[in-house]
Amino acid sequence: MFELSSLSRSDGIDTASDAAAGGRRSSTSWGALAGALAYRGPERRGGAALMTRLLALMLDEIDYGLLLVGDSGELLHVNHAARAELDAQHPLQLAGTSLHARYPQDVAPLTEALQAAARRGLRRMLTLGSAEHRVGLSVVPLPLPAVAMALGVSLPTRATLLVLGKRHMCAALSVQGFARTHRLSSSEEEVLSELCEGLRPNDIAQRRSVKIATVRTQIANIRAKTGVDSIRELVRAVAVLPPQVSALRGLGAVGMERGGETGLMAGLMAG
């Protein structure tokens, strides 16, 4: 496991005392924001507080992994999709509030992209991992002055959003929702799922130990029920559906834990 270099270091320009002071300022600033968001007084019942709670809930309804990184490299929030996505095979790994590159060849590109976002406001698109574990990653700088002004706290200039690419073209829940909408049978839904995995009819027949004629009949039934003219259009119809996340994922682990304090986005969720 290879940990990313701290983003608070400059390229050999700052002294050690400057870097330490910058780290203290960043920690204090993010702590002030977390405290402001976690405040539970009567003002928290106002419109602004409700909006922050709704925005935090929205992040967990997005079926793309989202990670928010502070300007000194600390991990501030991980949404539900990212927690589910970052399994033992993913090129990115979580360890507490630290983000790690799993493979050594990914350390430098990922670190450079995060530094470019934090220091120069540059967006990057990366490909991490290899073979079947290769995934795309979008690195997006987020300017924060407006947030600081609205909350009346001192904040660093930027945070960085990491958006994880999909490892599957069609999500299982999208396939299920599409199948139910068009009243597909269970066997037709299975065939649809396998088509969305990129399997050909012959491959599906071999996997399911049935005749190719059976699979072709099921595909014809699917096309008739959904009104599409080809397998390509069928797969595209599922791929462009709005993403869905499971309603059974639970309400826990909405924020990062930092030294016993509730993390930034958990503060957003606090009542």
Image (cartoon, helix red, strand yellow):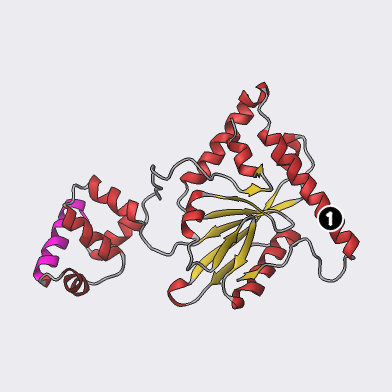
Instruction: Let me know if residue 245 is in the magenta part.
Output: no
Number of numbered callouts drawn: 1
Could you tell whether 254 is left or right of 31 in the image?
left
Query: Which residue is rendered at x = 47% and y = 68% of the image?
Result: 89
- The magenta segment is 213-228
Query: Which residue is rendered at x = 73% and y = 35% of the image?
Result: 151
Residue 124 appears anywhere in the view: no
Q: Residue furthest top?
A: 42
In the rendered image, residue 156, in percent from the top left (x then y), is placed at: 77, 49
Identify the secondary structure beneath mark 1: helix
Could you tell whether 266 is left or right of 121 in the image?
left
Query: Which residue is rendered at x = 35% and y = 59% of the image?
Result: 170
In the rendered image, residue 113, in percent from the top left (x then y), is placed at: 66, 67
Task: Decide: is 34 above or below 27.
Answer: above
**Hey, which quadrant is residue 167 in on the image?**
bottom left
Query: Which residue is rendered at x = 87% and y = 55% of the image?
Result: 21
Residue 208 appears anywhere in the view: yes
Which amino acid type is marked by label 1? Gly
Q: Label 1 neighbourhood size at 10 Å, few (<14), some (14-19), many (20+)?
A: some
Task: Decide: is 172 above or below 144.
Answer: below
In the rendered image, residue 20, in percent from the top left (x then y), is placed at: 85, 58
Looking at the rendered image, the quarter that the N terminus falls into is: bottom right
Taking depth in this image into account, of 84 and 205 the one nearest to the observer is: 84
Task: Decide: is 48 above or below 209.
Answer: above
Instruction: Let me know if residue 215 is in the magenta part.
Output: yes
Residue on which disc 1 sits: 22
Looking at the rendered image, the quarter that the C terminus falls into is: top right
Could you tell whether 166 is left or right of 183 in the image?
right
Could you tell whether 162 is left or right of 227 in the image?
right
In the rendered image, residue 61, in percent from the top left (x then y), is placed at: 46, 44
